[in-house]
Image (cartoon, rainbow, N blue to C red):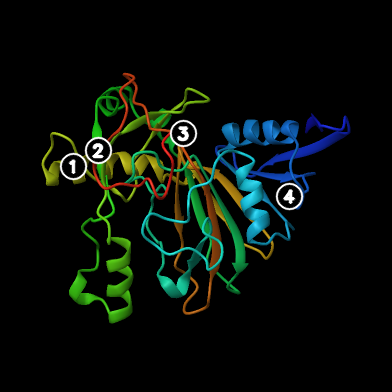
């Protein structure tokens, strides 16, 4: 239990209950329908630094409330660099099964120079079964690496892009799916990030890869696939993964700098929708202090540079 002090001097008790040994905690004692005081925000920041993903039940928020909560942690991004926002809510991205399914491991929007630091997801429409979100602790994955592989990973840089080799070729898609892909890649982004990112607040090192990481700098396409596949296998070890079964009126906050996530496509044709709001982030830094650099694409309409 963490005790915070509100701006009015009233003590607020926040309960943090671990969900798994390596990632995830449920939070109670916080009323997200109100503006959070600095002490509460600091306590939640400490909790997310430690547990990487926080779950809140019975939140009863609308889009404005979700934006207000996310803004407690910093300036917001717009919904997405290429995908349209929720109508009337430029910071809200509908994650809607009818508009495609993000059933691949990824970290949000790593193809831009400064991806979001935090992501929030709020349950809107939940299928009667399935539809879980998996969230993986990439810092634990880095610690799991054998020492020689950790040392090797520390030296690597990867090209992240939104225009990559999809599992399903363009000709295998129906018209709606082709249109969605066309929108997603309407602006091509390429950014070079360190494979091992140093967290700016905790100093932890984490594997910063995922689905948008397509190539290792200096390696061939085949070599890149092999190296990325090997490193990714440590991220997705069951011990490092929180499998969250959604219920109505829930919100999940996770640290986008040091996690990956995956929306499980196991709910047949049932509707599923979450609303996403993200907090603007910093430019990733590698173990040697070098920063990421942009190769292609201007994301200034999406996220401000720090």
25 with respect to 100 (left or right): right
**Looking at the image, is mark 1 or mark 4 earlier in the sequence?**
4
Secondary element at image label 1: helix
Q: What residue sits 68% from the left and 65% below the top?
A: 248
290 with respect to 266 (left or right): left
**Looking at the image, is mark 3 or mark 1 earlier in the sequence?**
3
Sort mark 2 into few (<14), some (14-19) or many (20+) by Cα contacts within 10 Å.
many
Q: Look at the picture and state if 239 lies above or below 91.
A: above
Q: Which residue is mark 4?
A: 32
Q: What residue sits 53% from the left and 46% below the top?
A: 76
What distance separates the C-alpha of mark 3 from that of mark 1?
22 Å
Q: Look at the picture and state if 296 lies above or below 205.
A: below
- Can you say which quadrant of the picture contains the N terminus? top right
Q: Which residue is mark 1?
A: 224
Q: Which residue is mark 2?
A: 158
**Looking at the image, is mark 4 or mark 3 earlier in the sequence?**
4
x then y, percent, for residue 225: 20, 46
Q: Are marks 4 and 2 in contact (CB under 8 Å)?
A: no
Secondary element at image label 3: helix
**Looking at the image, is mark 1 or mark 2 earlier in the sequence?**
2
Q: What residue sits 73% from the left and 49% below the top?
A: 32
x then y, percent, for residue 166: 24, 61
Q: Foreground mark, 4 or 2?
A: 4
What distance separates the C-alpha of mark 1 from that of mark 2?
9 Å
């Amino acid at each position: 239990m963490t005790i915070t002090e509100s701006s009015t001097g009233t003590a607020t008790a926040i309960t943090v209950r671990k969900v798994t040994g390596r990632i995830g905690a449920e939070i109670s004692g916080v009323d997200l329908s109100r503006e959070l005081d600095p002490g509460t925000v600091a306590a939640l920041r400490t909790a997310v630094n430690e547990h990487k993903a926080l779950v809140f039940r019975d939140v009863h928020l609308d889009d404005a409330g979700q934006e207000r909560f996310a803004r407690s942690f910093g300036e917001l991004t717009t919904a997405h660099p290429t995908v349209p926002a929720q109508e009337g809510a430029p910071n809200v991205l509908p994650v809607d099964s009818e508009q495609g399914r993000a059933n691949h491991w990824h970290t949000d929007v790593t193809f831009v120079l400064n991806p979001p630091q935090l992501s929030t997801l709020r349950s809107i429409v939940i299928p009667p079964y399935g539809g879980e979100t998996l969230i993986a602790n990439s810092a634990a994955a880095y610690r799991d690496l054998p020492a020689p592989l950790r040392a090797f990973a520390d030296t690597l840089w990867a090209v992240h892009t939104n225009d990559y080799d999809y599992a399903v070729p363009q000709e295998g898609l129906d018209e709606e799916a082709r249109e969605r892909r066309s929108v997603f890649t309407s602006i091509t982004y390429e950014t070079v990030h360190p494979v091992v990112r140093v967290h700016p607040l905790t100093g932890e090192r984490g594997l910063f890869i995922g689905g948008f990481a397509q190539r290792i700098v200096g390696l061939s396409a085949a070599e890149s696939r092999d190296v990325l596949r090997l490193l990714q296998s440590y991220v997705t070890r069951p011990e490092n993964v929180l499998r969250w079964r959604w219920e109505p009126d829930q919100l999940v906050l996770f640290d986008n700098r040091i996690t990956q996530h995956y929306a499980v496509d196991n709910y047949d044709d049932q509707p599923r929708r979450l609303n996403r709001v993200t907090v603007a982030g910093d430019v990733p830094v590698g173990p040697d202090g070098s920063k990421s650099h942009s190769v292609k694409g201007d994301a200034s309409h999406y996220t401000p540079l720090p």
